[in-house]
């Protein structure tokens, strides 16, 4: 790979390259570095008509060198002429650099996907750039937002005042624009965490809330919207209780999973399915056979029973009498509670 010095005045910037936002402070720091250490990495260019060159990547280094008044700049001259390959190389290079904004990425991906000159697919770009298809598609979703929101989008995940991360915006992407952008600006102003943005998005996606009510909610602060969400969810759960109770009761009695307010089916716990009295009653009723009288001739053989058998009969009668006394008491309590309720 040959590196040659080319006159700075013979080099043109590529106005269609993916990166066009350059932080002034970072550019000043780069100029200081070049003054002290020289340009550590060459820029890459391609030859154009009239003996001139166009930058493929290295715009910041070119700008810094030109501001410093450098007559020449070290360059790698590429022989690639395919526009798609050049543009992909520009994106790949910028993805490794700091300061390549999410919106610049989104616009670059959108251009490759939709410009008649390229017309590529997310799958193709994923293979070429080493990024998942979901990464490319999520970046493109950022373009749904208006310019006021786009200006606030920054890379990374840190929540900062008057800035927006991709994670903050994606929960809002499918809302109508009249709600989407104002909510994004509220999230930026009030530094809302992603979890709160998701709750607010859920509130605004609820079709049972009228559009007029949602419009009025936009006057609230971020914390006010979260409070509204909490109240609404609590009220919704409360309203669901009367309707769900008969079905839940039937499910518990049948031993079937119970549908909760959150939508999850949970098997009934023994404690929730029945009280200790009910459990004991069911156990006893299941083990005790239905009464069937002994035939009359069976009593004639009672005299022939051994003394040990008579003892077993006494123990059985004693046990049954205890059960009988206990269940009579339970019946009296149940009747008293029923009468009080009426």
Image (tube, grey):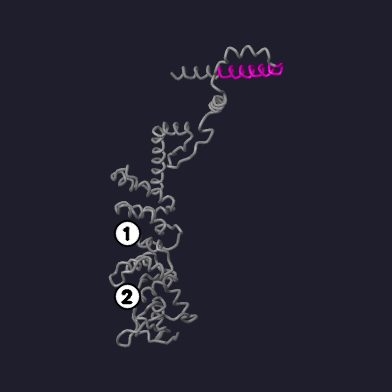
Main secondary structure along the magenta-highlighted residues: helix
The answer to which of 10 and 190 lies nearer the viewer is: 10
Graded by Cα atoms within 10 Å as few (under 14), some (14 to 19) or many (20 or more), the crowding at tag 2 reads: few
Label tally: 2
Q: Residue at x 45, y 20 (%)?
A: 341
Q: Which residue is mark 2?
A: 15
Which residue sits furthest right?
A: 307
Q: Residue at x 39, y 58 (%)?
A: 162
- Name which quarter of the figure residue 107 lies in: bottom left
Q: Which residues are magenta?
A: 306-329
Residue 326 magenta-drawn? yes
Residue 141 magenta-drawn? no
- Name which quarter of the figure residue 249 lies in: top left
| Image spot of residue 223 (x, y percent) | 41, 47
Residue 135 numbered mark, or none: none
Q: How far separated are the C-alphas under marks 2 and 1?
A: 24 Å
Q: Is residue 280 above or below residue 331?
A: below
Q: Residue at x 29, y 69 (%)?
A: 115
Graded by Cα atoms within 10 Å as few (under 14), some (14 to 19) or many (20 or more), the crowding at tag 1 reads: some
| Image spot of residue 129 (x, y percent) | 41, 70
Q: Which residue is mark 1?
A: 144
Q: Is residue 313 above or below residue 233?
A: above
Where, quadrant-wise, is the N terminus in this rendering?
A: bottom left
| Image spot of residue 22 (x, y percent) | 38, 71
| Image spot of residue 141 (x, y percent) | 35, 60
User: At numbered mark 1, what does the secondary structure look like: helix, strand or loop?
Assistant: helix
Q: Residue at x 29, y 72 (%)?
A: 117
Where, quadrant-wise, is the C terminus in this rendering?
A: top left
């Amino acid at each position: 790979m040959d590196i040659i010095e080319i006159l700075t005045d013979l080099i043109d910037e590529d106005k269609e390259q993916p990166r066009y936002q350059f932080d002034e402070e970072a550019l000043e720091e780069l100029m200081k570095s070049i003054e002290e250490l020289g340009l550590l990495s060459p820029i890459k260019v391609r030859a154009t008509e009239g003996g001139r060159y166009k930058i493929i990547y290295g715009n910041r280094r070119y700008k810094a060198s030109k501001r410093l008044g450098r007559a020449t700049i070290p360059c790698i001259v590429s022989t690639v002429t395919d526009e798609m390959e050049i543009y992909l190389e520009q994106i790949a290079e910028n993805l490794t650099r700091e300061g390549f904004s999410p919106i610049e990425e989104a616009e670059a991906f959108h251009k490759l996907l939709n410009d008649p000159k390229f017309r590529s697919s997310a799958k193709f770009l994923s293979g070429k750039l080493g990024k998942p298809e979901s990464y490319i598609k999520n970046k493109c979703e950022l373009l749904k937002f208006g310019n006021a929101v786009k200006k606030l989008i920054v890379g990374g995940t840190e929540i900062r005042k008057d800035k927006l991360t991709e994670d903050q915006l994606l929960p809002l992407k499918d809302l109508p624009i009249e709600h989407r952008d104002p909510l994004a600006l509220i999230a930026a102003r009030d530094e809302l965490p992603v979890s709160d943005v998701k709750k607010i998005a859920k509130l605004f996606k609820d079709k049972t809330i009228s559009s007029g009510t949602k419009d009025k909610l936009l006057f609230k602060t971020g914390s006010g919207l979260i409070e509204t969400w909490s109240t609404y969810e609590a009220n919704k759960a409360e309203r669901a209780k009367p309707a769900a109770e008969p079905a839940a009761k039937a499910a518990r009695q049948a031993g079937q999973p119970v549908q909760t307010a959150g939508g999850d089916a949970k098997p009934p716990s023994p404690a929730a399915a029945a009280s200790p009295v009910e459990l004991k009653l069911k156990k006893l009723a299941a083990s005790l056979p239905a009464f069937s009288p002994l035939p009359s001739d069976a009593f004639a053989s009672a005299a022939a029973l051994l003394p040990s058998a008579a003892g077993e009969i006494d123990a059985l009668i004693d046990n049954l009498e205890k059960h009988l006394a206990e269940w009579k008491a339970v019946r009296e309590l149940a009747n008293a509670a029923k009468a009080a309720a009426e």
